[in-house]
Image (cartoon, rainbow, N blue to C red):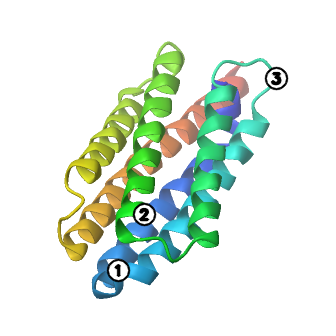
Amino acid sequence: MLETLKRGWWLVVLRGVCAVLFGILAFVWPATAGEVLVLLFGAYALVNGSFTLGLAFRVPRGAPGKGSLMVLGLLAVVAGVVTFFYPGITALSLLSLIAVWAVFTGIFEISTAIKLRKELSNEWMLILGGALSIVFGVLVFTMPRAGAISIVWLIGTYAVIYGAMLLTVAFRLRGLVSEARSAARLA
């Protein structure tokens, strides 16, 4: 799986960039949180899920972690599709959907990091990203009546930090590719 992740490091970069952009847009448009947040979240979930599925399809059949990536990608796509087909859902329903998605994302990312701990240095970044997702999901569940702008800022903060962590992991994977190429040239 590590080899597939190294070859698909750019997909992780795209996921990170989308997360950071989503977070920035959430800060730029806090007053129009309702409809804009629904559309932003739906678009982000679809793109994130598509990139995750793209990465999963690159993993060889039977490799550890392929199933986790597939489930993670499908969850994100389903969250995005549900958001677009039911745009009139209440803010509380959207927050619940976001919270569930964040918790499951965190669980699967921690699981993947544990599976890769012997193959990938700095796997703690992926574990930290997964823990951040779980904490974010729990906070959204426990504070559903907080002001709309506060929730938007919480979501924006989460997306920017999570995206930065994904970018860190992606560029570490890219570094592993460069190291392997250098070693191959010396051999």
**Which residue occupies the foreground of this view, 108 or 120?**
108
**Mark 3 Cα-neighbour bin, 10 Å: few <14, some 14–19, many ≥20:** few
Quarter of the image for residue 174 reads: top right
Above or below, comparing residue 18 to residue 112 in the picture: below
Amino acid type at image mark 3: Arg
Q: Nearer the viewer, mark 3 or mark 1?
A: 1
Q: CA distance from mark 2 to mark 3?
A: 35 Å
Q: Secondary structure at mark 3?
A: loop
Amino acid type at image mark 2: Leu
- Residue under label 2, please give it: 94
Task: Residue 33: give its label.
Answer: 1
First reached walking from the N terminus: tag 2 or tag 3: 3
* Residue 185: percent from left, percent from top: 72, 28
Amino acid type at image mark 1: Ala
- Name the quarter where the C terminus is drawn: top right
- Name the quarter where the N terminus is drawn: top right
**Mark 1 Cα-neighbour bin, 10 Å: few <14, some 14–19, many ≥20:** some
Q: CA distance from mark 3 to mark 1?
A: 41 Å
In the image as oriented, which residue stretches furthest toward the right?
Answer: 61
Q: Nearer the viewer, mark 2 or mark 3?
A: 2
Task: Residue 91: give its label.
Answer: none
| Residues at circles 2 and 1 in contact by the CB criterion of under 8 Å | no
| Residues at circles 2 and 3 in contact by the CB criterion of under 8 Å | no
Task: Residue 61: give its label.
Answer: 3
* Residue 184: percent from left, percent from top: 71, 24
* Residue 167: percent from left, percent from top: 46, 50
First reached walking from the N terminus: tag 2 or tag 1: 1
Judge from the rendering whether residue 150 lies leftward or rightward of residue 73; answer left or right: left
The residue under the point 57% across, 32% down is: 176
**Which residue occupies the foreground of this view, 58 or 44?**
44
